[in-house]
Image: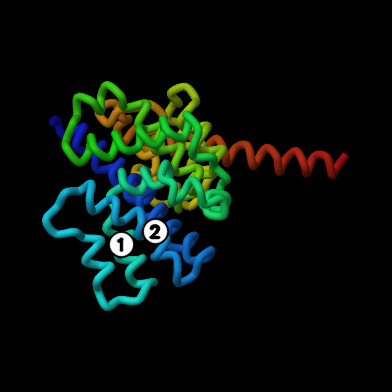
Amino acid sequence: MDEYTLTEFSIFYKRLMVVENCLKTLIVTRYTTIFGDNAYNILYRYFHVLDIKRKLKEQVFKSIYLSNKNNNEKLFLSVNKLYLGEILNIFANPVFLKNKKIAKIFFPIYTTTNTSEFQQKQKALKDFRNCIAHGNDKKYHLERTRMIKGLVFFEKILQCSTVFTNDMLDKISNQRKMSVTEILSIIYSIDKSYFKDDKKLIILFDDIALINGYIFKSLPQRWTIIRRKFDLEKHIKENENNQIQLKLDNLQN
C-alpha cells in the first residue's frame, strides 16, 4: 500500500470511529430511555446470537451476562464490545425492527432502516471499515466513491460532532469537484476562526477535499491553499469596504 492511500485511510478511520461511537452511544441511551434497567435484558437476545456467530472459545457477551455488574453496566460493557458490522446488523434484527418505539426515536434524523437505500449505505460503511481494517487498497480504489457516500450518509443521520451541517455535507459530497477557493469559502462560512490557524485550516481543507472527490495524492499543496486563503481574505475585505462606502454614499444622498 502506498503512503498516500495509508494517509487517506488514517483520515477516514477517524471519521468512521466517530460514527461508530455515535452509534454505540445511541444504542445505550435510546434503549435505556425506553426500557430503563430492562434495556439490557432486551438486547441480550442479540448479544447471545453474536456469541454464537463469533464461534470463539470465550463467549464475551456471556461472560458479561454472568458477571456481578448491574444491568446498566452490563449494557455499557456489551455495547462497547460490538464491532461496527454487528452494530449495523442490529438494524435488520427483530430486536430492533419489531420495536417500534426504538425504531421511531433511534436516529436524530428519523430514518427507516428497512429500505434499500439504508441497506446499501450500511453495506458501504461496513465495506469501508473492512477495507481499512484489512488494508484492502484495491477494493478501496475501485469503490471509494460508494464507500465515502455511505460514510457521509451516516454522518448526516447521526448528526455526528463534525463541523458540517446536513446541507453542507450534501453540497460537499454530491457537487462537482470544487476549486481551492470554493472549499476555502465553505470553511470561511462555517467558522471564520479557521483562517487564523493555518494548521487547522489545512486539516479541514483536506477533510473536505477528500469527500469532494480529491485523492490524497492530488490534494493542493499547502502553499497553494494559504495563498488562496490570503486572496480570499483580500477579496472579502474589499467587498466589506465597498459595502461600507455604499452605505455612506446613500446616507449622504
**Can residue 210 be seen at all in this image of the molecule?**
no
The answer to which of 139 and 30 lies nearer the viewer is 30
> How far apart in space, not on screen, are marks 2 and 1 (Cα)?
9 Å
Circles 2 and 1: CB distance less than 8 Å? yes
**x then y, percent, for residue 5:** 21, 32
Q: Residues within 10 Å of mark 2 (few under 14, many from 20)?
A: some
Question: Which of disc 1 and disc 2 is earlier in sequence?
Answer: 2
**x then y, percent, for residue 180:** 42, 30
Residue at horizontal 42%, vertical 41%? Answer: 92
**x then y, percent, for residue 245:** 72, 41
Q: Residue 93's image quarter?
A: top left
Does 81 sit above or below residue 68?
Answer: above
Q: Tell me: 31 left or right of 251.
A: left
Secondary structure of the residue carrying numbered label 2: helix
**Can residue 74 be seen at all in this image of the molecule?**
yes
**Three-letter amino acid code of the residue under disc 1:** Ser
Disc 2 marks which residue?
Answer: 43
The numbered disc on residue 78 is 1
The answer to which of 213 and 56 lies nearer the viewer is 56
Residue at horizontal 31%, vertical 56%? Answer: 47
**x then y, percent, for residue 25:** 41, 59
**Three-letter amino acid code of the residue under disc 2:** Leu
